[in-house]
Image (cartoon, rainbow, N blue to C red):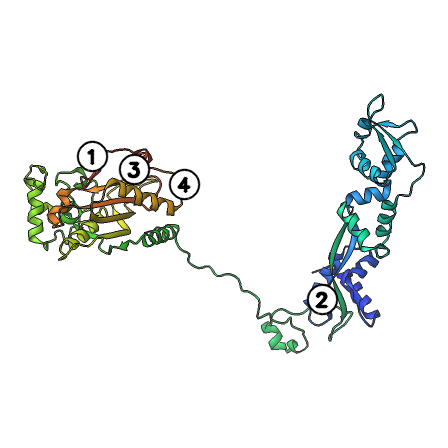
Amino acid sequence: MADTGLVETLLQRVEKVDGGLDSQDVATSLGVDHQAIVGAVKSLQALGDVISAEQRSSKHWELTGEGCEIAEQGSHEARVVSSIPEEGMPQSQLMKLAFGKVGFSKAMSNKWIRLDKGHEGGPRIFKTVERLEDLVRDKLLLVQKGQASQLEEKEKNELKKRKLLSEVTVKSYWITKGSCFSTTITKQETELTPEMIASGSWKEKKFKPYNFEAMGVALDCGHLHPLMKVRTQFRQIFLEMGFTEMPTNNFIESSFWNFDSLFQPQQHPARDQHDTFFLSDPAQAHEFPQDYLERVRKVHSEGGFGSQGYKYDWKIEEAQKNILRTHTTAVSARMLYKLAQQEKFTPVKYFSIDRVFRNETLDATHLAEFHQIEGVVADFGLTLGDLMGILHQFFNKLGLKKWVEVGNSGMFRPEMLLPMGLPEGVTVIAWGLSLERPTMIKYGINNIRELVGHKVNLQMVYDSPVCRLDS
């Protein structure tokens, strides 16, 4: 609420005039800041139709800081002339004065001074007039007195160009009496109370109009989790690159698809209870494609497809154990097996983003579950170069401006693909990331950029023996 005394004074001023008055004029006559009058107008408008206020705008000229200085002390050129004695002044000395450089140029243009470059002591300035009329100062004084209308537009624009004048737009209100005008301020009620209803006093009270256009208080509501936002970004990138999303709605998986089909030996440390969650009910899975299961058993225990295998007694009981999947690559295995059963092979690009589970020791950076991002491409003749190209495009779309360590990546081994029934010559490139830390990958290729453009013959088997890297 504006100052009550100022509001009452404004109402008294409005009462005494018939046509209305300007808020800027009121502020000038009262010697107060115009914004104080604007505040009083706003307060009265909130009370209803006490006054009517129409916003107007007008322009006027004001002196800049430098303009005020010239109006008080004279123009730069006039001060230069007054600073030069009869015997002249060295140009170097004049230029040391605060007004010297600008004043010298203007005074030379007005032919108020002359420069003797061949003077014995160096360039010397002499004045050529005894008396002068400082028109610049006179024009600024007119503006300062509120008589800018006496100047031509050309003169004002020249002063503006010299940054001595500025044109200012002033917004004000034209104030007139409203339909409920009164010089007495009555506070409007903002709410109807039970006491008013019981006593009937509400009939004599004035209530503040309800603003149906006002925005209500923002409600507390749910928001997308940051991980879900990042997941959406990754998913969009995959879709833009022509990938198809794999179904990942099976958190429970058999050890066969999670480990054995990926050519991971049954004695591998990742398969013990320290790293994997095993289910107690149902503890085992029983439905497998028997011919494929037999080929997997054989390549593990006896070798085949160019591999000597692991030479151990492969047990169906281990493959049947149900677990919470430790990676979404189990889904990739199922999809590749399904692809191999087609009558005619067709190239595919798959991706998935979903939860996986590890029996981790919980700490600030490890949970029992996290989200894995996986990309898989299957086609004839794919090489490490294709993998690098896809990774380059993927990370560029993600917004990384330089090569970083990438996640587990490479080419699926023939010992994994051929037992599925995929044709000879089909290769599969794949990579995986963690959604929670997409640029902090634990394994993979360091400084992969160094490999680009060089002949590479690199074989690498990491944690899981699913992939290999070769040229």
Residue 136 visible in the snapshot: yes
Figure check: 80 above or below 346: above
Give how far across and how far down residue 78 sits, in percent. Answer: 87, 39
> Reading the chain from its start, which is encountered first: label 1 or label 3?
3
3D distance between C-alphas at marks 1 and 3: 19 Å
Q: Amino acid at mark 1?
A: Gln
Disc 4: which residue: 401
Q: Amino acid at mark 4?
A: Lys
Disc 2: which residue: 44
Disc 1: which residue: 459
Q: Residue at x 46, y 59 (%)?
A: 220
Figure check: 224 above or below 190: above
3D distance between C-alphas at marks 3 and 4: 20 Å
> Reading the chain from its start, which is encountered first: label 2 or label 4?
2
Q: Residue at x 13, y 40 (%)?
A: 265
3D distance between C-alphas at marks 3 and 2: 68 Å
> Reading the chain from its start, which is encountered first: label 3 or label 4?
4
Q: Residue at x 72, y 68 (%)?
A: 54
Q: Amino acid at mark 3?
A: Lys
- Foreground disc of the pair 1, 3: 1
- Foreground disc of the pair 2, 4: 4
